[in-house]
Amino acid sequence: MATTRAPTTETTVTTEPGRPGFSRRCLLTSAAAAGGVGIVGAAGGFALGRGSGAQGASAGDGGPPRRDLDGANGPQTEPFYGSHQSGVETPAQAYAHFIAFTLGPGITAAEAVRWLRLLTADAAALTQGQAPLADSESELAVDPARLTVTFGFGAALVALAGKDHVPDWLKPLEAFSIDRLDEDRCTGDLLLQICGDDPLTVAHARRMLFKDSRSFAEVAWQRDGFRRAYGSSREGKTQRNLFGQLDGTANPGPGSEDFARIIWGQGTETADPVFSARGEPPADLGAHLPVWMRGGTTLVLRDIAMNLDTWDQADRPAREFSVGRTMDTGAPLSGKDEFDVPDFTAVDERGLTKISQVAHIARARDGLGPEAQIHRRTFNYETGAGGDSGLLFASFQADIERQFLPIQRRLAEVDLLNEWTTPIGSTVWAIPPGATQDGYVGQELFDG
Amino acid sequence: MRKNITLAVALPIAVAIGLAGCGHDDSTAAGSTQAGGSSSASAETVDSRVDAEALSLDGAWVKAADDGMTAVFGELKNNTDQDITLVEAKYADAKMVQLHETEGDGSGGMSMQEKKGGFTIPAGESLDLEPGGDHIMIMGLKKAIKPGEQISLDLVTADGETVEVTAVAKEYSGAQEDYAPGEAEGSSDGENADHADHADDGDDEGSDHGDHGDH
């Protein structure tokens, strides 16, 4: 049913490390609207977007929003070179394509380096709206629309540089009782996460990267995902998944101290860091990462099937009870705003907790410390009416053992949402740091 | 011969010859967000140029091949105020290298032939070497050129200057113009089976190599 509340919320699905207060969103919201949690600080430029309210595309005179007829987003670029790879802290684009490759037989380290150089060069050009070498459809390279290409390394690729470079966590996750994994979706030695606001640009990028991979590897699997189209909602607004839930409320804000610690594993050494209501995360979450990953992070990519048919059988109260949030605003059942901190002790007139102890957000965060947070960069998928539906759950965190697994274990144990969701794919990736101008992604590993 | 390329660069290469010393800044770069559509631009920068470049081959690449023949492409830029003519290219691991132009056959196909007199690049202008157009043809490969490898070749100008350029190998299915009979030693990927006959007369006007760059 339609709701009358502002569609600003979000929810959570599967694995959300729920957490309350937080970062940028929170800040904005609290600043612009109610005065809730008063944290502030870390909100960078993002805050503006959200706080500026409804005027985004409007004429500025209070008139109705206007359509952008000028192609303003086409030339927008995200950086390629830098200490971190783009596509992690980057505000999520509208489309994502995940493609995993399996190394060809007998591939050597030298050949892998040639491959990585080719892919790096392709990505460096494409993300800046330029045609890579030998691009036979160079016209499709213009209008990058915030294209990013993010590289993830699997154990076999890392091992080419030396087995002792393979971190012990770079392996399949432990088995969970809720898993119904398709082995074909759990493989791969190199992952490319290709994201952008324009599906044609994304398709072209995928084609180029694929063509330059054929001599070195085979496609293991590939998955497409989507979120709101560019321009449909204000940037920074939490996305909705196909259950209709807001998805990602608990994420740390880009540019925040929380983000630096939780995802990049190192603090920014800001003078007076501000943290979310979850508390101060440890500054050493990345300490366990090998030297070649400094500036990088880890990715757990879960392919989570969502059963829309059985979800249809759940009425709104049941849906909200299972998640612990309202469907419309995404507010915790103990609060009013999406970014209100859930109060797991609040009780209703009957004396029952407003948020069930087995609701998703309670399982995902109640009792877990500030280190147990992740950054979920999720994309929906749907293969057609009556087809497969789900969520490509990309979870970035500095330390899988300390951050991802505590949450996942609890959710696997008990989570009302498990009734409708089923993990069918699962992979773990090392996300190397960004490339330097004359270098390539993974250079610290192979040349180190 | 001077060179400037660095093998460390993932992309290509802007090589330059230092004929005269006409200054030219490198720069370029991946950082500049152009919004326009540079056609064959590469995002790379090579900042190893020591000499002011008179002639450069930007965005140089070669079609990967196991044996037989292949071709080198890129943007030949004359950064001087005088015309430069490229008369020869040398590649150590092949039996022969020629400068080729292509000729349309009137039905979308192209045949290629050696460009008599070489490529003249007018002062301040550039010549695109690209599939379906002018290119540097390598014949009789003595060893495979694998994707991602960098090869070096020497470009020789009419006044005897030589410049070493580097091209990165890319897997590429195109660039299958008809080859001259007798030179069809098989392509790298075995896909171009139609080595039809071709005219090896070199008398066609060779004046059209400028139009490949402006589409």
Image (spheres, grey):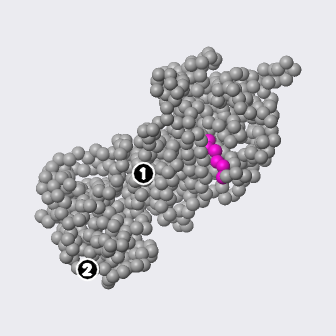
- Residue lying at the far top in this picture: please name it: A35
- What amino acid type is highlighted by mark number 2? Asp
Hey, which quadrant is residue A75 in on the image? top left
Estimate the x, y position of residue B214 in percent, counting from the top left: 29, 56
User: Does the magenta segment cover residue A381?
Assistant: yes
Where does the image place residue B152, in percent across and percent down from the top left? 30, 64
Give the main secondary structure, helix, strand or loop, of the magenta stretch: strand
Q: Is residue A196 above or below residue A239?
A: below
Q: Chain of mark 1?
A: A
Q: Secondary structure under badge 1?
A: helix
In the depicted structure, whether residue B186 falls above or below residue A71: below
Q: Quadrant of the N terminus of chain A?
A: top right
Q: Which residue is mark 2?
A: B200
Q: Is residue A7 found left or right of B81 in the rendered image?
A: right
- Of B133 and A272, the residue lying toward us: B133
Hey, which residue is sitting farthest bottom in the picture?
Answer: B182
Q: Secondary structure under badge 2? A: loop
Name the residue nearer the viewer: A287 or A378: A378
Residue bearing mark 1: A141
Q: Amino acid at mark 1?
A: Ala
The residue positioned 71% from the left and 40% from the top of the image is A243
Give the chain letter at badge 2.
Answer: B
Please provide percent x and percent y for residue B117: 17, 70
Residue beneath the point at 72% across and 34% down: A364
> A258 or B207: which is nearer to us?
B207
Give the Cα separation between the discs numbered 2 and 1: 36 Å
Q: How many marks are shown on the rendered structure?
A: 2
- Magenta span: A378-383
Image quarter for residue A50? top right
Expressed as whole percent of the image width and height from the top left, the position of residue A74 reads 44, 42
Q: Is residue B38 visible?
A: yes
